[in-house]
Image: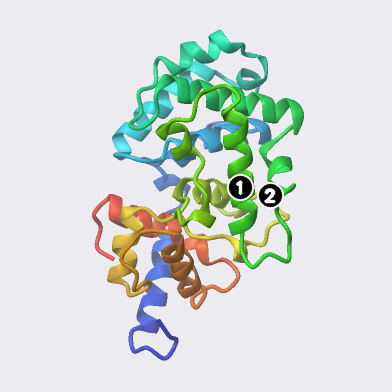
């Protein structure tokens, strides 16, 4: 993709139109609707992390699993994580059967989050132990953040496919769709995203790539790659910078939901 391409101007207009179209009134169905139920940063951060972590599979299954989790956590996800014991986490985990995750995986995730919030006080503080402003993008900070969380979760469970899937590593090639989704919500600020993590420049974010995003971006010639991995995510992001160099990932929600809702681009 180059600015000199014949269809560049038309594509830019369409991208910006769809970005403006998908405002907060059009969130549902999307896991992002769950953190919007809360008002405090701690509740939103925990809800967002759990919501992004379960954001794979059919949208119906995602929403169903997150309804179960949030109904169990009640009015404050932060209070639930901080004040629950292992039995409380076990009771929640037995209610959740979400694709690759088994109850032990979910319980280990909850216990890992509890340790993080008791020792580091937030996921934000943990992430910034590993992120440096001089980094080209969030790749290496995300890698170390994710591996720290995996190591913490492994204190409470044997390694499993589901647990490893929860904490992917961009250095190993994963597109890290769910982690990048969480970071988009935390870093960007608009009608959809919360913008709490102001220390990260939005230009350092990488687009969350799943099958819907990959398919649409291939059609739009934003990527030539065939496999939805980290390199594809970087390539799409770099091409989106042609349309907004400071905030390329702002187009993610629209691109994703055009695919999910089978809309015409």
Q: In which quarter of the image is the C terminus?
A: bottom left
Place residue 111 in its image quadrant. top right
From the top left corner, tell me how far across and down residue 163 is, in percent.
47, 32
Residue designated by label 2: 197
Please identify the quarter of the rendering in which residue 226 is found: bottom left
Q: Which of marks 1 and 2 is nearer the N terminus?
A: 1
Q: Say few, some or many: other residues with alpha carbon within 10 Å of mark 1 (under 14 / 14 to 19 / 20 or more).
A: many
What kind of element bears circle 1? helix
Residue carrying label 1:
186
Q: Which residue is drawn at 76% across and 29% down?
A: 119
Q: Give x and y (percent) for residue 94.
A: 41, 14
Q: Are marks 1 and 2 in contact (CB under 8 Å)?
A: yes
**Farthest residue in the top direction?**
87
Quarter placement of the N terminus: bottom left
Q: Which colour scheme is used?
A: rainbow
> x, y percentage for residue 76?
61, 22
Relative to 82, is 231 on the left or the right? left
In the rendered image, the residue lying farthest to the front is 158
Q: Residue 34 carries which label?
A: none
Above or below, 254 relative to 100: below
Q: Residue at x 73, y 62 (%)?
A: 133
Query: As displayed, is residue 49 above or below residue 256?
Result: above
Q: Where is residue 210 in the image (x, y as percent from the top left)?
A: 36, 53
Q: What element carries label 2?
A: loop
**From mark 1 to mark 2, how far is it between C-alphas?**
6 Å
Q: Is residue 33 visible?
A: no
Neighbor class of circle 2 (other Cα within 10 Å; few <14, some 14-19, many 20+) is: some
Q: Is residue 100 above or below residue 226?
A: above
One can see residue 3 in this view: yes
């Amino acid at each position: 993709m180059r600015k000199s391409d014949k269809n560049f101007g038309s594509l830019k207009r369409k991208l910006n139109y769809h970005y403006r179209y998908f405002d907060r009134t059009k969130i549902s169905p999307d896991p992002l609707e769950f953190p919007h139920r809360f008002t405090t940063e701690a509740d939103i951060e925990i809800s967002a992390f759990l919501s992004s972590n379960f954001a794979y599979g059919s949208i119906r299954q995602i929403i169903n699993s997150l309804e179960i989790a949030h109904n169990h956590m009640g009015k404050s996800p932060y209070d639930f994580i901080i004040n629950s014991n292992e039995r409380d986490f076990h009771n929640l985990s037995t209610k959740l059967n979400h694709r690759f995750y088994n109850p032990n995986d979910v319980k280990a995730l909850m216990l890992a989050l509890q340790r993080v919030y008791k020792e580091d006080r937030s996921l934000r503080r943990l992430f910034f132990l590993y992120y440096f402003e001089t980094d080209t993008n969030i790749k290496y900070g995300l890698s170390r953040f994710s591996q720290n969380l995996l190591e913490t979760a492994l204190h409470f469970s044997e390694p499993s496919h589901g647990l490893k899937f929860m904490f992917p590593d961009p250095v190993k090639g994963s597109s890290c769709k769910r982690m990048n989704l969480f970071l988009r919500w935390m870093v960007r600020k608009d009608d959809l995203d919360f913008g709490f993590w102001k220390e990260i420049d939005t230009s350092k974010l990488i687009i969350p790539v799943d099958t819907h995003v990959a398919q649409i971006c291939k059609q739009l010639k934003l990527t030539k790659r065939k496999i939805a991995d980290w390199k594809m995510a970087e390539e799409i992001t770099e091409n989106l910078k042609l349309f907004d160099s400071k905030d390329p990932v702002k187009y993610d929600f629209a691109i994703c939901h055009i695919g999910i809702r089978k809309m015409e681009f």
